[in-house]
Image (cartoon, coloured by chain):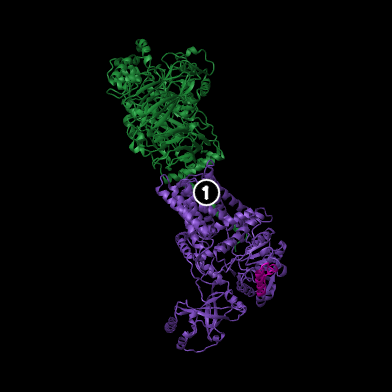
Chain colours: A purple, B green
Amino acid sequence: MRQALRWLAWVGATVASLALLSQPVGTQAQLAMSLAAMAVMIVLWAVLDGPRTRFVFMALGSLVVLRYILWRLTNTLPLPGDPVSFGFGLILLVAELYCVFILFVSLIINADPLRRDPPPAAPAADLPTVDVFVPSYNEDTSILAMTLAAARQLNYPPDKLTVWLLDDGGTDQKCSDADPAKAAAARARRGELQALCDELGARYLTRARNEHAKAGNLNNGLAQARGDLVAVLDADHVPFRSFLTETVGYFAQDPRLFLVQTPHAFLNPDPVERNLRTFERMPSENEMFYAVTQRGLDKWNGSFFCGSAALLRRTALDEAGGFSGITITEDCETAFELHSRNWTSAYVDKPLIAGLQPDTLADFIGQRSRWCQGMFQILLLKNPVFQKGLKPIQKIAYLSSMTFWFFPIPRLIFMFAPLLHIFFDLKIFVASVDESIAYTLTYIVINLMIQNYVYGKFRWPFVSELYEYIQGVYLAKAIVSVIASPRKPTFNVTNKGATLDHDHISSLALPFFLIYLLLMLGCAVAAWRYLYEPGVTNLMLVVGLWNFFNLLTAGASLGVCAERRQLERTPSLAIDRRGVLSLSGHSVDVAIERVSADACTLRLLSGALDPGLTRPPLRGALSVEPTAGARRAAPLPVHLEHATRDGPELVMRVNFGTLAVRDYPALAGLMYGDAEAMRRFQLRRRRHKDIPTGTLQFAWWGLVEPIRALRYLLASRRPRPVEIEEAPVYDAPSAAVAPTPSVPAAATAGAAPTLPTAAKPTDVESGDDWVRLMMDYENERTLAELRGRRTSAA
Amino acid sequence: MATRLRLPVLGLLVCLASGPALGQSFLGTGPAERLTVPPSGNALRAPSEDGASPARRPDAAAAEPKSTPRPPEPPRAAAPQTVPRAVIQSTIAPARRLPSGPRGFRLTGEEDSLRYPVYLTDAQTRGPVRLRLSYLSAISVAPESSELAAFVNGAKVGWTRIQAPGAVKVVEFAIPDGVLKAGFNAVTFTASQRHRVDCSVGATYELWTQIDPSRSGLVVGTATDMDVRSLAAAEPDESGALPIQVILNERPNLARLERMIEAAQALALVGRVARPTVTFGPPLQGRNGINLVVGTASEIAGVEGVSELGPITGPRLAMLPTRPNTPPTLVVTGARDEDVRQAITNLAVPADTGTPNGLKAVQLFRGYMVQGGENLTLDRLGATSREFSGRLLHVGFALRFPGDFVPADYGKVMLHLAGAYVAGLSSDARIVIDINGRNAASVPLPDARGEVFDDSAIPLPFSLWRPGVNHVEISAQLPNAADQVCDTLSPAAKQARFLFLDRSRIEIPHFARAARSPDLAAIKGGAVPFVVPGRRPRLVLPTPDRDSADAAATLAARLAMAAERVIDFEVVTQQQVASDTSQLVVAPARALDPALLEAVGFDPQQVQRVWEGRADMVATPGQFGPEGVLTLDRLRRNLPMRCALPTLIPQVRPAQPAQAPASQSEASAAPAPTSATVPATAPGSSSDRELIDRWEASTRGSRQIWAALDSVWNEITGTARSLRQTVTAQVKPDETVEVPATASLLIAEGPPVQSSNTVIVTAPNASLLKASVSCLVDPVVWARLGGSAAFLDASNGTLVTSRSERIEIVETQPRSLANLRLVSAAWLSINTEYYVGMTLAMALCLGLATTSLVRNVGRKNS
């Protein structure tokens, strides 16, 4: 009853608002309304907080947007008498309608993102058995070793945890490939991975034929495995130790729960983040999806499977006949099937895995093409609107996730629409300048405000547009092809871990350069026409500014095409762990600040380390303090790379050299022991970016990045030697590890030249500097200690 | 007539004086540029004028071609006239004049045209017919490249070079047989004018040709065969107004006065004239206007000629047999009062006959009536496709919006222009759209290579339009480099620069239909408050002297034209501050209840002060009387013809020797507040007071019980309105409006009380009231009426309007969702703060409703 009243109140308020908005009031009234709404929104934003404020804020914004779109629909279309303008005008209108549709659908879905409490802990005996599936196709052994090792170390009763490597790169089909080289490689891969699994305690599984791609591979795993739950981890998605403890409990709470999805968190930047250098500052593109949208979907029992970092209930999968494989996005399709069979899903907003993103623009586009095409396949082959068993809100949820992928088309329309007026004088948007200000400008600002209010912590202003444009240029083609033949697209495994050893222009850059030049020409023509051509009105100014904004977007995207070299060979993660570093027989407590698959950064905590021992490349061992409940792993072999002074403390970088398989559990324990590390990293980036600074940042990219792109382009014309960034690591004989106690500082300093310092020719500090540095360091530390004592005594 | 007698002599004199160069000019030379059409008094002085001072001769000549509107036939002048009349008529025959319309009589700019519908009876179309055109032109008009052409029913009947900068020039064109048809015919004048020396766009505004309406028209015989179906053949006077003389043969009583005013309204409707002038008095003489006899058989028994109608048993409309030198006389009668009413109803059914061109001219004359939801090509609005070689092309047309059109920014009329322009225009070439003289849009003609455009859409927001006639002018400013040199003789000057296509369209979407109140525009455009169904509106005449009654009847007739139906006024004498029905109060300022003035927002003391000096004056009879003056200067200034004030002299109570000759002659003709209302029967017998008493007495009996059916809507809006008034009253106290010192008339509408409106029309004194109303109803002046109060300086037709802070919207249409939406949109557009407030409130409600809903659907947030 009360619920019915609430519905009645809401429907009443909505109808009344629509009735008011449908009034064709004058431009002045509209401007006053929009500005008042904007002012109230700013006040609400600044002063109040809480769910009521949030909804009033969004209602205000929605009313302005609705008013705009009603006006746009009724007043701004060119006359059908001019078919060219009318046609283009209609296209632009449809693109805008799409954007408004997406906005409103996203507002509905994200009305009240769900915050979940951690699941209750269950006694070990009651825990279900879990199979961890790591499907692989072509990933490196080192990547798989880390994933499998980390999976084996998950905080879960070992007898209830089985880790499966589902290898599609070593299938019988591959091993008997017509190409002998390929067949040999597949066989070698199979052998190598079998050995890896044996050593790490995982189970290797492959199959006869590569049918149905990833879904088929997973279903093959299902056929072999017997666990109650299935955790799916992509080969590069390394789970943190707490992955299962944070998720398994939900299955006990809800017997109809088929899925617990966790976010995909990444250790490395995608091409946009790397090339615009935002990885450390700006939340990743997918964080908006994982931190807001999936939580929003979760409220409506609509969060869906994203292919990895999720747990699924086996009985549910069995009921649906395993993972669905009709489309190339088997994950969403599987969730879709199960949702319509009245199973429920849950989403845990806590990064519990750390994965890799495609490094190059080409790989990135390839990955997105797959997602885009897959979502369209579902839309076309299993339209959620007609799917039985789904609740209306779930239909909207799936529809929004699928129609979202239409974005390339409207984005490209917005990019090119102003050119029609600038070059051909087409008037595809009939409005006076007054009206444009009262309706369009306020709409744009309010739209930005809504986006910034809802997603401000997760998405900088205009970054969505940038991502959309970059993908749009290539995805538009993908959309056309999938719509033309929905069953055609095939699963392409995204390439990850590619190396970028020098700055260069992406192979996909050509269209971006062409579009940039076209838009630049458009700006020039617009400016010329506005300034010198008689009879050209302020409309040209407005259109010119629009085109200029597009030019900035295109400029920033040129920056994305200008691939920076990768500074880290393997991505690192900031952690906060303790350990003991044994170096030349000395053992010191260290804080481990940052770790990658190759190396880690240590900070000396206390005690004097004999300065001589910090001479690289000494070999030592790093014994890591285990996280609570974990077993102490074997010490990791390390080489000192270099050390620097940071105030009174010493910061050392050590690398692991070539790790043996047996070392991976230790490394995995170090790097993936504490999921908080990933969370801290993400939270650090999630600072609200307001519209003015975001706009300035975007404009800066738009202006500066094309210059960098041009520089790369010119540089790539000249043949140049491949610059070797990192010298090969010299693995000193193991004898060097032997403790050399109480070597006097001076002696070490004297001994230094005998060591092959030439191995690090790119080191900024020469040997002499190093010695002096160490001396200074020691002196200062002593003095500091004296001072410290004095102050503490006083 | 006495004046005709003198004509040959005068004509000769003028010709000699003006010399051969101005051979065709009749006027304009001589010491005075006065082209007086002598009002009635003039004729009476005829004997003294026989000695014709040189100064007056041109005047007399000017006045000559048509007979003056209402000189009483002086019997003594009749005898000597008979012989010379034939002679005179062979020289200059009287013409059937053109009616005045909202565009007046001026052709301006490089190209312009004026079109008049002229109703002719069958008899008038027979025989040789000529079109006479008298005009005066600007000095800047170059005769060698400027011409004036005349068309009748679309057929060109002649043209002339425009060359009358110094004096009115008269030309006549023969109209071929068969061109004119019985019924409405269209007479069109087009002018193509070029400047003598200046080729700039600005200079084109110096170009004008003024048609002198008093000396122009169709030279046809009088409508001897006029009957009740061809009343539109009644001829306008020299100003283009149709004089309607309501013949009084006995004391009026209010019921009969009501009838008379109704009949006058009906006649105005049938005649389809834009400009009626109603007067009460003895029958008119001459050929202009129409005499109207209204009353039951017994009431009209005394009127001359009525006896010939035979016994009157039921509703009866009849024309009295025409007699020479008298306009037609219409009798509206019946056995009883109800029969008279029925007869009036029968009268008010206009039947349109005429040529297609003529009927179109009728339709367009007062503006094409639009109701919303129309898509009209401009050729339907009278525009024609043309190539244009000048630098400023005007294409004008008029649209008449209903009186309950709500002007606000909630929609727009779209003009879709089709046309072309040539290469080489200057960069500032543009098309400018003006609505009612206010700039509405400006579209550049940007392409240096020229362009053919088929559908250049130009929005014209509703806020620029007004109820009633709206004049839209499309001006193409087409300067080019050659204009700098300005070689008017080069062949390039004849090259077309612009092509206007009459398939250009105007698209009028549905607009809100509701009366804004107070808004005089709604009154001038549709007499809105007086036509709402329900109670009868009142016409309040606190001092029913003849001048006031004339003014009231003229206004009523004009309002009937606006409403396009007879308004059932209840004529009363009591003033009520808050009436229960809409009332139109017509009275001199002194007679007004001060509380009434206050109610419409004036300070009675201020009004008193401003008009104190003129209150006790009376109009001199004579040439500068209220009927207007016609001088070259006034023609040049394009002043509305009737907008001239009589010379005032202090009022003299008893008849005095100095006044005697005048009062003797004007007993029946000139407006004379002091004289009897019914001069024929009771000269000087009844004073104002007596009249008031008597009229009041008769009114009391005719009081009706009003139906007290008030809709729920009215109650709600009433409550809301009073609520809001209490709120706004605290914010902004009502300010009184000051009457400007030059005003000779004030018309004001008070804020609506219980959805009834009070409109007061007042002037310093009765004669000024009549003269000013006569000016007010000139279509040119009338079209400018607006705001909550308007002040007219009737000496030159200047109208100052003042706007009300608060405008109510009153329902006028049957309730429909579509209209309700438009009306509320209009209201919200005007009351922006309410719109903003409502939107914010809505957002608050929606936000809170969403909060409560979202919390309770889906999974709950922990």
Q: Amino acid at mark 1?
A: Arg
Q: Position of residue A478 (x, y in %)?
A: 60, 57
Q: Nearer the viewer, residue B619 or A361?
A: A361
Instruction: Check if residue A652 falls in the magenta segment.
Output: no
Q: Nearer the viewer, residue B783 or B131?
A: B131
Instruction: Check if residue A173 falls in the magenta segment.
Output: yes
Range of residues picked out in magenta: A164-193
Q: Position of residue A658 (x, y in %)?
A: 58, 78
Crowding around mark 1 (Cα neighbors within 10 Å: few <14, some 14 to 19, many 20+) is many
With respect to residue B107, does A627 lie above or below? below
Dividing the image into 4 quarters, which one contains the C terminus of chain A? bottom left
Q: Quadrant of residue B600?
A: top left
Magenta span main SS: helix
In the picture provided, is A580 more to the left or to the right than B760? right
Q: Position of residue A613 (x, y in %)?
A: 49, 84
What subunit carries mark 1? A
User: Which residue position is annotated with label 1?
Assistant: A67
Q: Quadrant of residue B73?
A: top left
Q: Nearer the viewer, residue A697 or A553?
A: A553
With respect to residue A286, does B671 lie above or below? above
Number of callouts in the render? 1
Q: Residue B702, can we see it? A: yes
